[in-house]
Image (spheres, rainbow, N blue to C red):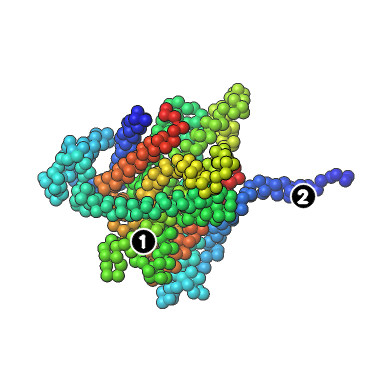
């Protein structure tokens, strides 16, 4: 009688344990993840909390473009509310970045596992090709690729995958080489598990620590890339807002109306800083 | 050592051939072909096909790549320069010479003439930035690494993390807001033409600052990590126990050993700098190669895009080679296999 456990209580504590497992311990990582979550929440809520539609022009605001009670962060030269555009721009960034990072990680992990596990000719072919792709300066590679295949969501994802999968592959290859001599890998092989099982259920989970930190760093880099491409005019086509192109549209206005480019620029900085701090904290926890 | 360098050079040549082929394939993918661009969007398909035939563009890809290489090496004349086509493209160097990169369709000039001045401008920007980046990142990195774990280290490391996270164009916007919009101390654009108000030197300040900010934090963090790692080595403890001061230990032992990995990273930063240069030049309307590459990419000027990319590849490859060789030269423990 006395030792009957309250089932509600135990699920609560189990949840708390789960929560603690995922909630990083380093202060910088906690701060980073909070910043990222902040932007994710704003992006999700954008249709409800943004004061104006992102492309609506307020003719009344054209007389006074600066920040005011009606437009907290002011409007751009076309009378579009900057705050609303930043909120909607967060959606663009936070859709492209996870897709691109996931795709780069998928490809990078696959080639890294293959070249580390099989070695020999497979390894040499993959490593050789990776070296060649890595010998291009990244931004030059992006410009050449996007200029050739055209700017669109899928092409940006392809470009980011091509440019970052080789270096992810390199890291995974190193980890795989280290892990394949472990006892549990030999055990799995001896049990007659398939190669795919060994790769994805024995080796990969044990390499997750360093990969998580790298994942966070790559996501930060992808934010920078998406912004930079937008800034250079290689991003998603207008008029839908994205932070990089907002900066590009208004950069010539800086001497007169600095806030138009400054606020989207600062939004971008805060999101990248979030990812870098998360990466830094995760690396510290290793 | 010599054998090692030679083997690396051969590897480099193989990489150069494969990567230039890849570059050729990717750029040939672009939607507008050269003939389509010359004739304009309203040309009939058979006109385009005719010009393709004349320019040798209807041949299979490997054949075209070989043609491109032979034009580059001066073995073949560039078909675009043929007066019979009436394109009004001519090259003062003749139609066959080594290093013929073809004609830029955007400027209607040989690529070499188009590139000369932007190359000088970008080299100036990069060189001034490097002169600042190297000492600054070494100073910050050594200071933080030699005092690893202290408050000074934490402040410097955090500062580096923040600075590294700021994208170049955002850094440009922030600096522009402060120094141009608010204080009006510096010019907002850098066309490198001296005006009454702004000298050329003042136009260089902000582009150099953006490049430096984008690179310093990253390099300093690597220097710091290497220094902090070296500080835990047994010989540092020995030096401490035999009574050397911390300053002596750091300057005599730690810096010399801790600088080996960052040296190669510093060289490889050139690669990163090239990307930074593109963004930086676009922000400040700086007349350099980076902005030219972007314009050429958006215009679809294949010859110009290919040439600039080849150049950046060459720079990247040579710095990689130098980094490898210097790593071996600096670190006698590395075995040459």
Identify whether B184 is placed above or below B206.
Answer: below
Identify whether A176 is placed above or below A85.
Answer: above
Q: Which of marks 1 and 2 is in front?
A: 1
* Residue designated by label 1: B205
Left/right placement of residue B81 relative to residue B320 reads left
Front in this rendered view, residue B302 or B336: B336
Left/right placement of residue B210 relative to residue A24 reads left
Q: Measuring 43% from the left and 56% from the top, which residue is drawn there?
A: B213
Q: Measuring 59% from the left and 28% from the top, which residue is drawn there?
A: A182
Percent of width and height locating residue A58: 44, 72
* Residue designated by label 2: A8
Identify whether B84 is placed above or below B212.
Answer: above
Percent of width and height locating residue B265: 43, 43
- Say if mark 1 contacts mark 2, CB within 8 Å: no
Q: Measuring 48% from the left and 69% from the top, which residue is drawn there?
A: A73
Q: What element carries label 2?
A: helix
Q: Is residue A33 at all visible to an observer of this figure?
A: no
Percent of width and height locating residue B143: 51, 51
Location of residue A231 by image quarter: bottom left
Question: For the C terminus of chain B, which image quadrant?
Answer: top left
Q: What element carries label 1?
A: helix
Chain that bears disc 2:
A
Chain that bears disc 1:
B
Front in this rendered view, residue B243 or B86: B243
CA separation in Å, label 1 and label 2: 64 Å
Q: Is residue B133 at all visible to an observer of this figure?
A: yes
């Amino acid at each position: 009688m006395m030792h009957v456990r309250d089932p509600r209580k135990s699920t609560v504590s189990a949840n708390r344990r789960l929560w603690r497992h995922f909630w990083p311990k380093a202060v910088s990582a906690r701060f980073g993840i909070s910043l990222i979550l902040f932007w994710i929440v704003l992006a999700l809520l954008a249709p409800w909390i943004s004061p104006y539609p992102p492309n609506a022009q307020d003719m009344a605001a054209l007389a006074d473009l600066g920040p005011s009670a009606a437009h907290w962060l002011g409007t751009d030269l076309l009378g579009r509310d900057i705050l609303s555009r930043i909120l909607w721009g967060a959606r663009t960034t936070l859709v492209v970045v996870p897709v691109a990072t996931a795709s780069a990680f998928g490809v990078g992990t696959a080639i890294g596992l293959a070249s580390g596990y099989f070695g020999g000719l497979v390894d040499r072919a993959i490593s050789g090709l990776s070296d060649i792709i890595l010998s291009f300066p990244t931004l030059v590679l992006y410009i050449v690729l996007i200029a050739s295949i055209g700017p669109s969501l899928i092409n940006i994802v392809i470009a980011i995958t091509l440019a970052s999968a080789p270096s992810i592959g390199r890291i995974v290859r190193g980890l795989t080489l280290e892990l394949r001599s472990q006892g549990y890998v030999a055990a799995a092989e001896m049990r007659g598990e398939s190669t795919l099982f060994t790769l994805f259920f024995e080796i990969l989970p044990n390499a997750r620590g360093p990969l998580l930190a790298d994942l966070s760093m790559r996501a930060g880099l992808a934010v920078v890339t998406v912004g930079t491409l937008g800034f250079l005019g290689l991003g998603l086509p207008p008029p839908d807002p994205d932070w990089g192109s907002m900066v590009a549209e208004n950069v010539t206005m800086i001497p007169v109306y600095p806030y138009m480019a400054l606020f989207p620029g600062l939004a971008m900085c805060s999101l990248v800083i979030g990812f870098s701090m998360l990466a830094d904290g995760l690396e510290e926890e290793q | 050592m010599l054998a090692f360098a030679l083997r690396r050079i051969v590897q480099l040549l193989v990489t150069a051939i494969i990567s230039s082929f890849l570059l050729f394939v990717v750029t040939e993918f672009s939607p507008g072909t050269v003939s389509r661009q010359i004739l304009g969007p309203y040309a009939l398909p058979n006109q385009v096909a005719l010009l393709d035939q004349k320019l040798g563009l209807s041949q299979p890809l490997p054949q075209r790549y070989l043609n491109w290489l032979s034009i580059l090496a001066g073995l073949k004349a560039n078909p675009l320069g043929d007066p019979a086509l009436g394109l009004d493209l001519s090259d003062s160097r003749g139609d066959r010479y080594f290093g013929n990169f073809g004609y830029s369709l955007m400027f209607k000039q040989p690529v070499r003439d188009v590139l000369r001045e932007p190359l000088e401008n970008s080299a100036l920007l990069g060189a001034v930035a490097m002169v600042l980046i190297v000492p600054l990142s070494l100073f910050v990195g050594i200071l933080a690494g030699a005092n690893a774990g202290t408050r000074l280290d934490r402040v410097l490391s955090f500062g580096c993390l923040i600075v590294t996270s700021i994208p170049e164009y955002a850094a440009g916007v922030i600096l522009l807001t402060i120094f141009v919009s608010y204080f009006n101390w510096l010019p907002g654009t850098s066309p490198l033409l001296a005006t009454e108000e702004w000298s050329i030197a003042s136009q260089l300040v902000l582009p150099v600052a953006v490049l430096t900010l984008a690179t310093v934090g990253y390099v300093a963090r690597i220097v710091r990590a290497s220094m902090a790692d070296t500080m835990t080595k047994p010989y540092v403890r020995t030096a401490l126990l035999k009574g050397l001061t911390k300053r002596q230990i750091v300057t005599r032992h730690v810096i010399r050993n801790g600088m080996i990995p960052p040296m190669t990273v510093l060289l490889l930063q050139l690669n990163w700098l090239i990307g930074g240069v593109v963004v930086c030049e676009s922000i400040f309307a700086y007349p350099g190669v980076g902005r030219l590459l972007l314009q050429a990419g958006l215009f679809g000027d294949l010859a110009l895009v290919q040439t600039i990319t080849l150049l950046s590849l060459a720079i990247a490859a040579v710095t990689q080679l130098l980094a490898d060789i210097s790593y071996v030269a600096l670190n006698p423990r590395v075995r040459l296999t």
